[in-house]
Image (tube, rainbow, N blue to C red):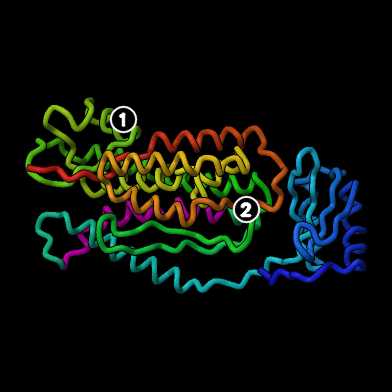
Amino acid sequence: MSEETSAAVSPVVAEAVRDEVEGFFQLDDITLDWPRPGYIRFRGVFLRDLESCYDALSERLRRYGFTPMVRREGDAIALIAAPMLYEHSPSDWRINLVLFLATILTTLWVGAANEPGFTGYEIWMGWPFSLSMLLILGAHELGHYFAARHHKAPVTLPYFIPFPTLLGTLGAVIRLKGPLKNRRALLDMGAAGPLAGLVFAVPILFIGLATSPLVPIAGPGLQEGNSILYAVAKYIVFGRWLPGGGVDVLVNQVAWAGWAGLLVTGLNLIPVGQLDGGHVAYVLFGRRAGRLFWPVIIGLAALALLSQTLTWVLWIGLLFLFGRVYAEPLDDVTPLDPRRRIVAIFTLLLFFLVFVPVPITVRMP
């Protein structure tokens, strides 16, 4: 992004920008240096469909060093010429590659570590877990990536995060280098990740469960938590609710990866801030989505107290740091079309199906 100017806007430049805007916008009033020095606010009504004309308007204002933002001010529409341009330097793909290779190693290690006969050298034994996890995480992030590219938004390739314990990874992220054009683009980008990830996670989970045995619950160990979808999947495969009757499924590497994929999806769908669920909540509710912050924090705090799970303490801290800021598109006025509204509602409902209230418990002898 080019540096934003703080100098007062020149009347000559303002007049030139006004001439460009008038072909798209019926002007009621103009305010210079609003909402900050260097900005120009036009209020009125668009003469064309905003979604179809935004790119052309953006190209015209770009000649003068401005980016158009569209906001609703009460009953009025405000077209704000912001004195900045989003310039995008290329990313270094070698960093993505190194992190991906490191994540292959850490997921191989975690997968192999639970196999009988593992001595610390045969990490190739963890390939079912590693392959399954990378498929799920890769699909999730590439869903975001291709949706962003479809809308011509600047975005990096996925950065995988290696972590040599628990799941072998802390997930993967992509980085947008500029804001998305409108709510429709934000919804497509936000929902594409979890939906694409579940396309792989659900079949992987069922394959893993179908090849995992039922065993008596005995002795100390770690117990993976149930989400609604995970509990139903076990019922479909085994014909009973598990754990129950003194038995539970002893998950193999593939089932473990499938469960982890649901866990990661549920965490990403928490409807606040820069999380995928936060993007979906914003496109549905606008700035009112910010009202979800405290109910989510209180809910996670209650889970932390009731389950004594440190995971939620960590997430509460992260949400305090990053959960209050939502990704606002440049055009915050164009509404979702009916098909996207259905997708948005469905995506938020998925949160309740895949969220794991107590991810891991320690089973005592």
Residue 284 percent location from the top left of the image: 60, 38
Position of 83 with respect to 279 (left or right) is right
Residue 168, compared with residue 301, is above or below; it is below
Q: Residue at x 53, y 44 (%)?
A: 191
Hey, what amino acid is under mark 2?
A: His
Residue contact at pointers 1 and 2, CB within 8 angstroms: no
Instruction: Kindly identify which residue carries mark 2.
Output: 150
Could you tell me which quadrant the N terminus lies in?
A: bottom right
Position of 289 with respect to 152 (left or right) is left
Position of 35 with respect to 298 (left or right) is right
Q: Earlier in the sequence, mark 1 or mark 2?
A: 2
Residue 340 percent location from the top left of the image: 61, 37
Answer whether residue 130 is magenta in the image: yes
Which type of secondary structure does the marked residue at label 1 adopt? helix
Dominant secondary structure, magenta? helix
Q: Residue at x 11, y 54 (%)?
A: 116
Hey, what amino acid is under mark 1?
A: Val
Q: Residues within 10 Å of mark 2 (few under 14, many from 20)?
A: few
- In the rendered picture of this protein, how many numbered marks are placed on residues? 2
Residue projecting furthest to the top = 239
Determine which of the numbered discs, if any, sits on residue 232 in the image.
1
Along the line of sight, the residue nearer the viewer: 364 or 346? 364
Q: Which residues are magenta?
A: 121-146
Which type of secondary structure does the marked residue at label 2 adopt? helix
Answer whether residue 350 is magenta in the image: no
